[in-house]
């Protein structure tokens, strides 16, 4: 009897979703151009590519279940920068039914020096936002590809 009671307690506390990945609204990367060189079509294309690659890597690694942000895409486009809009990314993610909001920003200092930043904000509880960053050398497809892979594999997914 005690053995069955212990097993029932274990199952109730562990639950079927214990260890299951959280649902994440992964928004497209945004650009923060700090350089004297204006952004161009190649910059926009890289943001789109790195956004898709981040989503794919997070799912492949089993870190999150990525949910579509398409239903709020128009509202996101109308809003301010997701990093400076007083929590609008969190609101959009909640509207989508996500557990976490993931935003990304590329800071371009020059064509040689760039930073790829990813921010993960839990939407329940009081856990703080986590920030992940990698420096890139060179504004090329290859540097972005290597950067996002390193970020997910070695910082976000360390130990998984």
Image (cartoon, helix red, strand yellow):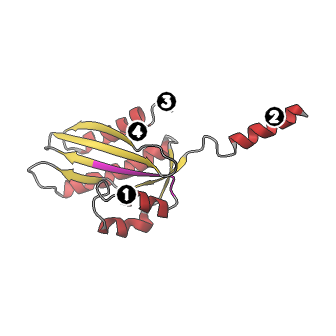
Dot 2 or dot 1: first in sequence order is 2
Which residue is drawn at the image coordinates 39% and 34% (left, top)? 155
Q: Quadrant of residue 2?
A: top right
- Could you tell me how far apart the alpha carbons at marks 1 and 3 are, in whole angstroms? 30 Å
Query: Is the residue under label 4 in contact with that under label 3 (CB below 8 Å)?
Result: no
Question: What is the x, y in percent for residue 76?
Answer: 35, 65
- Could you tell me how far apart the alpha carbons at marks 2 and 1 are, in whole angstroms? 43 Å
Seen in the picture, residue 19 relative to 103 is either above or below; the reply is above
Residue bearing mark 2: 6
Seen in the picture, residue 137 relative to 31 is either above or below; the reply is above
Dot 1 or dot 3: first in sequence order is 1
Give the number of the disc on residue 159. Answer: 3
> What SS does tag 4 mark?
helix
> Is 64 on the left-hand or right-hand side of 147?
right
Query: Is the residue under label 2 in contact with that under label 4 (CB below 8 Å)?
Result: no
Dot 2 or dot 3: first in sequence order is 2
Q: Which residue range is magenta in the image?
A: 98-105
Give the number of the disc on residue 152. Answer: 4
Question: What is the x, y in percent for residue 65?
Answer: 52, 50
> What SS does tag 3 mark?
loop
Dot 3 or dot 4: first in sequence order is 4
Residue bearing mark 1: 87
> Is 138 on the left-hand or right-hand side of 21?
left
In the image shown, does 99 or 108 lie closer to the viewer?
Answer: 99
Which residue is drawn at the image coordinates 60% and 40% (left, top)? 19
Quarter the N terminus occupies:
top right
Residue 102 is a magenta residue: yes
> What SS does tag 1 mark?
loop
């Amino acid at each position: 009897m005690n053995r069955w009671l212990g097993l029932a307690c274990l199952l109730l506390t562990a639950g079927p979703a214990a260890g299951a990945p959280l649902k994440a609204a992964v928004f497209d990367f945004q650009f923060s151009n700090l350089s004297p060189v204006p952004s161009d079509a190649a910059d926009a294309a890289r943001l789109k590519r790195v956004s898709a690659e981040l989503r794919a890597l997070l799912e492949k690694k089993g870190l999150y279940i990525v949910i579509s942000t398409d239903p709020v895409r128009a509202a996101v486009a109308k809003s301010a920068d997701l990093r400076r809009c007083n929590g609008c990314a969190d609101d959009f993610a909640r509207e989508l039914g996500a557990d976490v909001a993931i935003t990304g920003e590329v800071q371009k200092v020059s064509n040689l020096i760039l930073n790829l930043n990813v921010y993960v904000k839990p939407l329940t509880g009081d856990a703080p936002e986590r920030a992940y960053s990698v420096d890139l050398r060179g504004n090329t497809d290859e540097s972005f590809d290597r950067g996002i892979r390193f970020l997910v594999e070695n910082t976000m997914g360390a130990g998984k």
